[in-house]
Image (cartoon, grey):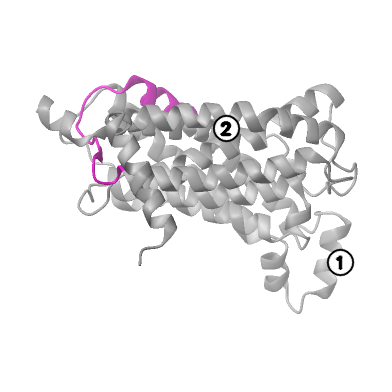
Amino acid sequence: MEYAHVNYMRKVIGYMNNNGISRRPALVGLLFAAGMLLLLLPLRLWQQLRLVEDLTGFWMEKDFTVVLLYIGLGLLAALPCAAALALRGSAVLDLTRRCRTPEGVTAGLAALALAWDAVMAFGYAARLFSGQGGAVFSVLEEQSPSLMAYYIRSGAMACLLEGVFGFLSAVFFLRLAAIDVRPQKNAYLGRALALAPFAWCVCRILRRFSRTIAYLKVSDLFLSLAMLAALMIFLLAFAQNVAGRTSGYKPAALLAAGIPAAVLALLCFVPRVVAYGLFGSMSSSTIPQDALIEWCDPAMAAFVLAFVGGRVKNGQSIQAKQ
């Protein structure tokens, strides 16, 4: 006896194949991302301006927009995974060397944003190492059994490593941008350097976890953690593909994680920019002062969408061109 969800998935796959959706997997992903932004971004703007407490960043009240937000986040996580499973037999990743201007431009912007993020991370780490992190970190310093324990608990080590891997990631994306704009047959990105963006993302999420708060009650940090988790999966799959490991890795992980990561990055960035533009400061004290406006979020979102839109293709169409 087959489960109901198996039959439902078969019907979804059959619908996609019959209507030619599987022939344009990247277009489907980009349209889905645009639709989710149109649905969720107004909710996040309203919540950022009306429902977030001034000092804690918690919800002041849970109205219908909070319920709609969590429903939308559930769809954002589930539908790309279902689409990736449905398209895994037909979609492939185009790794041919040719000019890719949108990807190259967004890779260059990502390099600049990562370099700036590294500078900010180094500055924030320097203040933590010097004991100038504020009252919260002074309490941590008193409660820590050793100086190294304080550096780990306060996020100072994570900030330092974030800066290091941020600069390495900037170098990697600059190299990728140069290859995309002016293709070279023998160009080699390097497997170790390709893992730098993944390591940078790991350090970012470690810095977020250094704040001992109720994450489910904090709107900004909850979305940031969800975005970073999806971005980690995408960057790992991305590194394994662009560094030359093409066997056994199809674009399922890139679609399933890349689209949610890009949408969540914009959901984190745009409301903060609007709030900063209207009030001149962010109201949530749960976000570090150096991370109020993180330009790496929209830059990485643009790169993810450009990479998925330009690389994820139908396998039969690629074979026909070759």
Q: Give the foreground label among 1 and 2.
A: 2
Q: In which quarter of the image is the N terminus?
A: bottom left
Q: Residue 247: where, in percent of width, then height?
A: 20, 52
Q: Which badge, 1 or 2, is on the more N-terminal residue? A: 2
Amino acid at circle 1? Val
At a point 36% along the width and 44% down the height, the residue shown is 11
Judging by the rendered image, the residue that carries numbered circle 1 is: 139
Examine the image and state in which quarter residue 42 appears: top right
The three-letter amino acid code for the residue at tag 2 is Met
Give the residue pinned by disc 2.
36
Q: Callout 1: helix, strand or loop?
A: helix
Residue 1 lies left or right of residue 294; in this view the side is left
The quarter of the rendered structure image containing the C terminus is top left
Q: Seen in the image, is 65 located left or right of residue 247?
A: right
Image location (x, y in percent) of residue 114: 53, 38
The one of 111 and 298 positioned closer to us in this rendering: 298
Q: Could you say whether the residue bearing mark 2 is in a helix, strand or loop?
A: helix
Q: Where is residue 68 in the image (x, y as percent from the top left)?
A: 70, 40
Q: Does the magenta stretch include residue 94?
A: yes
Say few, some or many: other residues with alpha carbon within 10 Å of mark 2 (under 14 / 14 to 19 / 20 or more): some
Please provide the residue range marked out in magenta.
87-109
On the image, which quarter does residue 117 sit in? top right
> In this orientation, which residue lies closer to the viewer: 8 or 73?
8
Mark 1 → mark 2, Cα distance in angstroms:
41 Å
Q: Is residue 135 magenta?
A: no
